[in-house]
Image: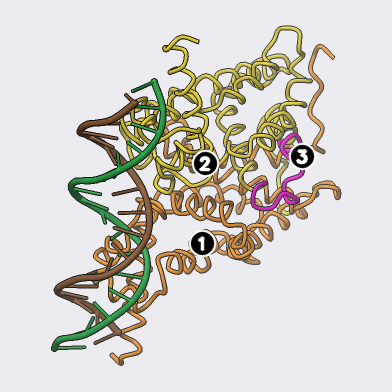
Chain colours: A orange, B yellow, C brown, D green
Amino acid sequence: MTRAQAKARTRALLLDAAARIFARKGFAGASVEEIAEAAGFSTGALYSNFDSKEALFLELLSHRASDRITAAAQTLDSPDASPGEALATLGRMLIDVADKDIDFAPLQAEFWLYAIRNPQVMDTMAATMNEPRQALERVISASLAQRGAPAEVSPDAVTTVVMALFQGLVRQRRVNPSSVSEDLFGQALMWLFTGILAGGAPAPASGD
Amino acid sequence: MTRAQAKARTRALLLDAAARIFARKGFAGASVEEIAEAAGFSTGALYSNFDSKEALFLELLSHRASDRITAAAQTLDSPDASPGEALATLGRMLIDVADKDIDFAPLQAEFWLYAIRNPQVMDTMAATMNEPRQALERVISASLAQRGAPAEVSPDAVTTVVMALFQGLVRQRRVNPSSVSEDLFGQALMWLFTGILAGGAPAPASGD
DNA sequence: GTCTATAAACAGATAGAC
DNA sequence: GTCTATCTGTTTATAGAC
């Protein structure tokens, strides 16, 4: 292993440890010593690889937002998968990601809090989210088109709704797992798309 | 003003300031001196009213989760309001609350992060959320019943979905307001309820 | 490139004056 | 009941050895 490779490895280990510790303690609550030790190094090594605690955090915010989510969405975003199947399984895949990666939701929450408190990084965060968002939007767009959704339904709006629903349910699942069954997200997506395809106008209340 | 009243006032001012500072800086990032000064007192006064920074935060987590949300839901939860109107306006009311109270969403995020990192307070947090949740569930339940939703549709599940959607959209609105228009939440609720009333089964893909 | 040791600043919490 | 002053531990970041 060359020196450059060794340094790159140290850097990667530090980033992994940082993601874990930041998720568990928060940005302000995590100490650099804690992160360095979790990675098996000293604070000196950490500062030789990153300018500051904040720079380390921003590196994560920029490049580690949601690789797994993107991968999940891209799996569905292939020519041979029918949009019908895609939507039916999307719910379970995302919930699965959220369950397996225990640090995912709190780290996203830390990123969001940091971004609204430091508006100058808002664009960076939005850019990081862009990739998984577009992957999801392609799946949704294809499904809407194939199922003959009304033209006035914006895939962009539907994507925003689906992502919001996902994030909200993942968080609630951490508070009370039994209140968010594995199928609930899929069920909600089914309701949502049924309603969209029905034209978006609900049946009038019986008393109207 | 009696001594007891004066102390109660100090306490209330400290709690208000704490909610603001915790929302803006986070639990770990906020200092007690900062909170005390924002309330117009010294750290000594703060410690004469609260045992610790953590006790102050827990007081907020227990008693200030969502008064405004509860109020909004209860406005709709009255005998003379038709469920049809209720659902139509619910979206805008909640978005309005979120827009007016700039500290609402980040404070909720801090509560959630604290709860998942300190499981012993999870029950406390769930209990605090119970009141607004039940108010919302009554509105939803009434609407489902009046519109003749299928019996197998659980108001509990629908309420969870609506709350998740609300929280997710409020957060996204802070990142990119133009991606979450004022009507989007109402639109999503309309899709959702249309789908539920249609029986929950989406039209099959045209290729099936 | 990483480690040990340490500097400098800051935070949570307390003690005693008023 | 609140304020001023301070104690104590911890934190970020750096300097110099290897």
Determine if residue B198 is in view: no
Distance between the Cα atoms at labels 2 and 3? Answer: 23 Å
Pointer 3 local density, CA inside 10 Å: few below 14, some 14–19, many at least 20: some
Tell me the chief SS of the magenta region: helix
- What's the magenta region? B173-188
What residue is pinned by disc 1?
A65
Mark on residue B182?
3
Q: Where is residue A208 in the image (x, y as percent from the top left)?
A: 85, 14
Q: Quadrant of residue B45?
A: top left
Q: Which of marks 2 and 3 is nearer the N terminus?
A: 2
Distance between the Cα atoms at labels 1 and 3? Answer: 27 Å
Distance between the Cα atoms at labels 2 and 1? Answer: 23 Å
User: What amino acid type should be assigned to the residue bearing mark 3?
Assistant: Glu
What residue is pinned by disc 2?
B23
Determine if residue A95 is in view: yes
Classify mark 2: helix, strand or loop: helix
- In front of the other: A31 or B162: A31
